[in-house]
Image (cartoon, rainbow, N blue to C red):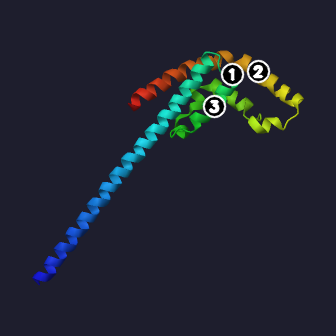
């Protein structure tokens, strides 16, 4: 009888040690995952801030900045619930107007006449929407700073 009790205690002890090891690994994994997510969010916020400042200083075309910012915002974890399109309507309106236009290699497949026509259309949108976009850029810069300080 005593042998069974000792064996049972030994099994429970070994299983407890194993469970403790697994729990330690889980905690380390969770910590690493949180650190990686925090690093990714910081990178996205930093990218949004850099693009917004470039737009503000006219170092980046408004249309290109709007595309880049809209895509970055869509990649944030809370994008489904945060409704960024309502917070920064001009940026998203510009994105919606020009997202169908080809970029990079796809652009090279179009005739020059068609490219010039799309460029004029895009530039017209930039002129038309500049004030609203610059207002959105101001508020997005404030928001990014808040997000980055909250993360620290």
Q: Nearer the viewer, residue 87 or 104?
A: 104
Q: Position of residue 36 (x, y in %)?
A: 44, 43
Q: Nearer the viewer, residue 82 or 8?
A: 8
- Quarter of image, res 20: bottom left
**Which one is earlier in the sequence, the residue at label 1 or at label 3?**
1
Mark 2 to mark 3 CA distance (whole Å): 17 Å
Name the residue that disc number 3 marks: 68
Give the labeled residue for mark 2.
123
Quarter in which the C terminus is drawn: top left
Q: Is residue 43 left or right of residue 55?
A: left
Q: Quadrant of the N terminus?
A: bottom left
Residue topped by disc 1: 61
Which residue is pictured at 15% across the width and 81% down the height? Answer: 4
In space, the residues marked 1 and 2 are separated at their CA atoms by 9 Å
Where residue 87 appears, as percent x and y from the top left, is 56, 27
Within 10 angstroms of label 3, few (less than 14), some, or many (20 or more) residues? some
Q: Residues within 10 Å of mark 1 (few under 14, many from 20)?
A: some
The single residue placed furthest to the left in the displayed view is 2
Tag 1 secondary structure: loop
Residue that appears at 54% across and 20% down: 139
Q: How many numbered marks have been drawn onto this rendered protein structure?
A: 3
């Amino acid at each position: 009888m005593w042998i069974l009790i000792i064996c049972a205690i030994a099994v429970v002890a070994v299983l407890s040690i194993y469970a403790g090891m697994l729990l330690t690994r889980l905690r380390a994994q969770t910590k690493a995952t949180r650190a990686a997510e925090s690093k990714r969010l910081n990178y996205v916020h930093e990218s949004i801030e850099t693009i917004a400042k470039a737009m503000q200083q006219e170092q980046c075309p408004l249309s290109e900045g709007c595309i880049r910012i809209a895509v970055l915002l869509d990649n944030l974890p809370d994008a489904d619930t945060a409704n960024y399109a309502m917070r920064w309507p001009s940026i998203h309106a510009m994105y919606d107007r020009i997202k169908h236009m080809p970029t990079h290699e796809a652009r090279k497949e179009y005739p020059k006449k068609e490219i010039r026509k799309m460029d004029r259309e895009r530039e017209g949108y930039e002129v038309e929407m500049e004030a609203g976009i610059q207002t959105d850029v101001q508020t997005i810069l404030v928001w990014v700073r808040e997000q980055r300080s909250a993360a620290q």
